[in-house]
Amino acid sequence: MSWGIPTSAHLSRLYYELGRWGARSVGEKKKWRYRFETKEELIAVAADWSRYDPRLLQILVQWGLESWTTWHPVLIRSVMKRMTTPQTVGVVAGFMTTANPLDRELELFLNYLIADLKPVSPQFYFFDLYLPGSRLAERAAKESLEEFKQWGFLSRERVLIDAKTKKGVGSWDPESRRHILKRLFQRRRQIQISDYLEELQYSISRQQALLDLKNLPAKPQGEGRSAFWSI
């Protein structure tokens, strides 16, 4: 049994229910036909429905980072069998790992949660977010974040984990970064390392950006931070 396609009323009620369990979520207690007894069921349905509402993915990642020690992994794995796309739990786990890569206990928890989960065939993560054939669709296909790609999904939307600092998480693998660099050079004959870092939302180090430019290959004109690169 899956939960089907959510309506705006369903999403509002889900926000309400998630907020009751401590997630950073505010909604309304609208009528719906569902009956969820545990937060683990809400985690599963929110992961499934996050493909219809990017905000849900952000809520789950934030909530998971704050409260994962209260989540029951056995119950989550059990209810994942009812999901339309259980790989969405893998995406949530990926962003949580990226946000807190040094937490060994979190790593062990998430490894158990996603054990034996297989990637889907290549497809956009979010439904109806991009127009077919649009530039945004092309960029999502070629410049997807690693947290999506490892599960077969395509999307380049990073996840905000701190509303105050606007800190986001999400990483581009070498292939996606290469496409991003090529796109930047298609728009401009010359770029600076700062242009590249800004495009990646400063998700990599300056040293890695320098290596990416050399591997493209691109050549510098000038020295230091003021150097311009061209191909």
Image (cartoon, rainbow, N blue to C red):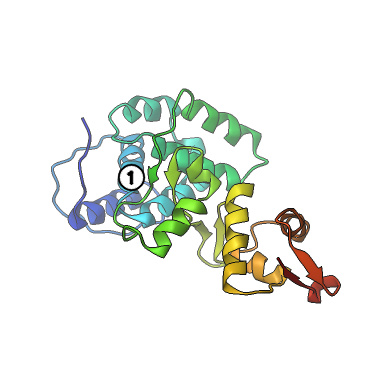
**Could one spot residue 200 in this view of the protein?**
no
Q: Residue at x 17, y 40 (%)?
A: 34
Q: Where is residue 110 in the image (x, y as percent from the top left)?
A: 52, 33
Given residues 26 and 59, the one toward you in this image is 59
Q: How many numbered discs sit on the rendered protein?
A: 1
Q: Vertically, is 135 above or below 152?
A: below
Task: Give the quarter of the figure containing the C terminus.
Answer: bottom right
Q: Position of residue 133 (x, y in %)?
A: 35, 59
Q: Which residue is drawn at 56% across and 64% down?
A: 183
Residue lying furthest right: 223
Given residues 132 and 117, the one toward you in this image is 132
Q: Residue at x 85, y 71 (%)?
A: 224
Q: Position of residue 75 (x, y in %)?
A: 37, 27
In which quadrant of the rendered view does residue 190 lie? bottom right
Q: In this view, does 50 lie to the left or right of 62?
A: left
In which quadrant of the rendered view does residue 30 lie? bottom left
In which quadrant of the rendered view does residue 105 lie? top right
Mark 1 lies on a secondary structure that is: helix
Q: Vertically, is 174 above or below 2?
A: below
Task: Give the quarter of the figure containing the N terminus.
Answer: top left
Q: What amino acid is at disc 1?
A: Ala
Q: Name the residue under label 1.
A: 46
Q: Position of residue 113 (x, y in %)?
A: 47, 29
Q: In this view, does 168 lie to the left or right of 51?
A: right
**Could one spot residue 167 in this view of the protein?**
yes
Residue density around tag 1, few if under 14, some if 14–19, many if 20 or more, within 10 Å? many
